Image (cartoon, rainbow, N blue to C red):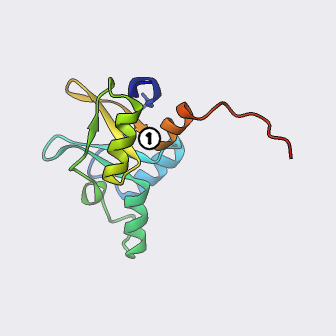
Amino acid sequence: MLVRDAMSTVVLTIGPAHTLRQAARLMSARRVGAAVVLDEDSCGVGILTERDILNSLALGQNPDAETAGSHTTTDVVFAAPAWTLEDAATAMSHGGFRHLIVLDGSGPVGIVSVRDIIRCWAPARQHIPA
């Protein structure tokens, strides 16, 4: 199975000036664990994850003052839609992260997460007798 078959094509994109609280609200409303941060003026495409927000809060930082741009990972490993799920899982395992931005051409076309991969690899939910 390929990344294009498992990825979410509805991608939450935010700008670097969004506060962490704004980003968290958007991520919560969309029920996603990561947002793509688009910054045309500097790094281009980055990612902000739940873990980035959690780490900021753990440091006692103010989520209304901290910006996504200050917590964005910019040295991102990108996936291609034609990667296998094994390729994506290997990249995630080696990099220690749970999300890959999927690029096709010049921009993001999706995100694939560990959860997406598990959903494809695991059998459909069945009632398990007690």
Front residue of 122 and 102: 122
Percent coordinates x, y for residue 128 in the rendering: 80, 40
Percent coordinates x, y for residue 22 in the rendering: 41, 53
Q: Is residue 53 above or below residue 116?
A: below
For the point 13% across and 44% down, which residue is it? 41
Question: With 59 as the anchor, is 31 left or right in this view?
Answer: right
Q: Specify the farthest residue to the right.
A: 130
Front residue of 54 and 122: 122
Front residue of 52 and 64: 52
Percent coordinates x, y for residue 67 in the rendering: 30, 59
Q: Is residue 91 above or below residue 79?
A: below
Question: With 25 as the anchor, is 122 left or right in this view?
Answer: right
Q: How many marks?
A: 1
Identity, as a three-letter code, of the amino acid under mark 1: Ser
Secondary structure at badge 1 equals strand
For the point 21% across and 23% down, which residue is it? 105
Residue matched to label 1: 113
For the point 39% across and 76% down, which residue is it? 60
Percent coordinates x, y for residue 16 in the rendering: 26, 50
Around disc 1, counting alpha carbons within 10 Å, would you say few (fewer than 14), some (14 to 19), or many (20 or more)?
many
* Quadrant position of the N terminus in the picture: top left
**Residue 37 is drawn in which quadrant?**
top left
Q: Specify the farthest residue to the bottom.
A: 60
Q: Is residue 19 above or below residue 10?
A: below
For the point 16% across and 46% down, which residue is it? 43
